[in-house]
Image (cartoon, helix red, strand yellow):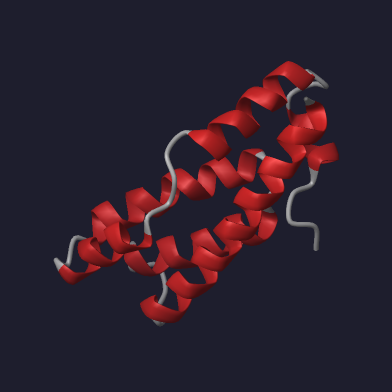
Amino acid sequence: MQVLDITQALELVDGEIDLLCSLLESFVHTKHFDRSHLENLVAQNKYNEAASYVHYFKGAARQLFAQECAQAGQALEDVFRKKTEGDISSLTDAFSLAYEKALKAAGQALASFS
């Protein structure tokens, strides 16, 4: 599985490279996932806030067709929203790793368009 599917992401924005670059720029340089922030929310039993926090990054990953990151985020969000059961720690590990890979790939993709 590709970390990012730039071809699909480009199709999503109707081939507008400037728009794709804007999405990549936002993903790379705007708000970053902070695992310690998520862990603090969990420690305070703020599961709805934790779900919303993960949802933000999952959605950004989906726009870039970062499927592993989006899927890991969905799995974690589903546990927070009590749609399913799962180990929050291991799901957070998976999401954090997938996010870091997506962040690196997005940076490389952005550089390739410059």
Of residues 20 and 73, the one drawn nearer to the viewer in this rendering? 20
Residue 46 percent coordinates (x, y): 19, 60
Q: Residue at point 42% right, 61% down?
A: 77
Residue 62 percent coordinates (x, y): 62, 45
Residue 48 percent coordinates (x, y): 25, 55
In the figure, 7 relative to 73: above or below? above
Among the 4 quarters of the image, the one containing residue 80: bottom left
Q: Position of 57 compared to 22: left or right?
A: left
Asked if residue 48 shows in the view, the reply is: yes
Task: Please identify the residue farthest to the left as the structure is shown.
Answer: 44
Q: Residue at point 57% right, 39% down?
A: 28
In the figure, 60 relative to 90: above or below? above
Q: Which quadrant would the N terminus be assigned to in this image?
A: bottom right
Q: Residue at point 68% right, 20% down?
A: 19
Q: Which quadrant would the C terminus be assigned to in this image?
A: top right
Q: Residue at point 37% right, 62% down?
A: 35
Asked if residue 65 shows in the view, the reply is: no
Among the 4 quarters of the image, the one containing residue 38: bottom left
Among the 4 quarters of the image, the one containing residue 18: top right
